[in-house]
Image (cartoon, rainbow, N blue to C red):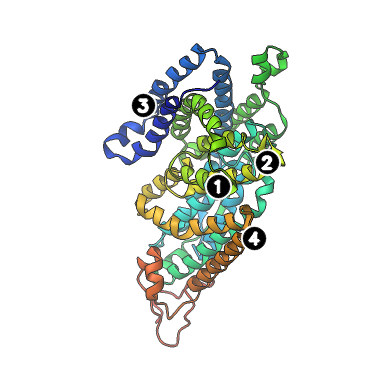
Amino acid sequence: MTFPAWTIAPFVLMLAAIAIAPLVPSLSKLWDRPRNQLIYALLLGLPVAIGVIAVGEWHLVVDALVEYGQFIALLLALFIVSGGFFLRGDIAATPRVNTIFLAIGGVLASFIGTTGAAMLLIRPLLNTNLERRHKAHTVVFAIFIVANCGGLLTPLGDPPLFLGMLRGVPFTWTFHLLPMWLFVNALLLLTYWALDRRIIAHEAKEDVYADTVNVIPLKLVGASNAIWFAIIILAVALIPSLDPDAIVEGDATWTQYVPWREIVMIGAALCSLFLGSRSIRYDENEFEFGPIQEVAALFVGIFLTMIPALAVLRSAAPSLPLNEITLFVFTGGLSSVLDNAPTYATFFEMASQLPGEPRVADVPELYLMAISLGAVLCGAMTYIGNGPNFMVKSLAETSGVKMPSFGGYVQRAVMYLAPTLIAMMLLFIAQPLWLKAIGLALTLLLLGRIVMLFVTTDGEVGAALAHLDPDVRGTRPAVPPVGRSRKPAGAFDSPPRPDEP
């Protein structure tokens, strides 16, 4: 059935509230309560559901509610199990150590989810950098890598990819995105390492010394939760869920009425919750259900209001200028300012109406690749592009880190992340050779910037670099005495003691 264009309005209002309400002081306090978010979601979603049922398309509501239940079950299970881990300790916050932290987080994000990886690593990362004055850039790159770009390799990594799996994308298909994952995260890690190496040279040497001597070895506690993570991963990959299509058609067997996969995942989460250490979860990890309640409240509205919106967009797809580049740009652009899961679902449906071979889940594979990359990677462009972004920002500010404003964060994303994503798009998605050549040239320019950050000039920040980099511009040069090494203190070796000349 074709719905009139105006029926997309509830979906637009739903996404607009998610994007705007947290930024408006008079609304943010009301919006922060999951109860109020649920009321708003139901005020928009229930009339849509009733209208769809009234015109005889009740099966679309059933499909949406089943997909919502599957979606929330996975997020809830990952959220609960990740809350049982905690990484104790405080080691020297050298550029190498911080880069390793971010690299580990980027790998974990694909297997325990970007939210789980971010919540697991952000507190230890903040503790490690406690003695350093300049650390906002570290949190920004944690959002880039751990809370977004790392979660590209499996449907567990980021909600958009799980929505794709629910629509028929094979669990292992996302492994095809490994080259892009490596390219983006490697460039971001190299950029961060060179930037942090520059910045630590401008820290007060007594702060760097204190960071070096106040060391507590790292220790992962709650490691038994890895068992429950393994069960969830196996359930997603191997166990079927209920079959809404067979149910709607009336030929489902009794086994197709049972959500086996969700039962196993929630069972594993409950085992983690009740069998794990309460002190690790609630005292050290400060675990609470607020974030997942917010997600559950908002997405019931999103899934219901999406029903007519997806139908409208599906019918409009053949007349739009959609190709592999525009799909990446449109999906990425909207994922930057709206939640990336419904954005993915929207363009997935539109791409299913386009010609092209080979196809995956009835979507041309090249287009599916562009949509997946745009939704996951570009969610890092703003604080509101992906759920973990604001959570990491909030935890950092609670720990005393002065984070960039919304505009300041976007400035850093445009500076570091956007060129990396453009280079990746040109090299891996674009088909004309001349675009690939431009992508290679841009990659070489990005590597040149890394070298520029790496090379020091007597510990001072050059004028060009100061204009280029707000993080370096905010530091004070620590010029070493004549005759002393120009290598930034703390980059590889222990810094001098404060009482040394």
Q: Residue 33: image x %, image y %?
A: 36, 30
Counting residues from the start of the chain, the first of labels 3 and 4 encountered is 3
Q: Of circles 3 and 2, which is in front?
A: 2
Q: Which residue lies furthest to the left in this view?
A: 26
Counting residues from the start of the chain, the first of labels 1 and 4 encountered is 1
Which residue is the site of mark 1? 328
For label 2, the SS is loop
For label 3, the SS is helix
Q: Residue 396: image x %, image y %?
A: 41, 50
| Residue 369 to residue 208: above or below | above
Mark-to-mark CA distance, 1 and 2: 16 Å
The image quadrant that residue 496 belongs to is bottom left
Which residue is the site of mark 3? 36
Which residue is the site of mark 4? 433
| Residue 359 to residue 67: above or below | below
Q: Residue 356 carries which label?
A: 2
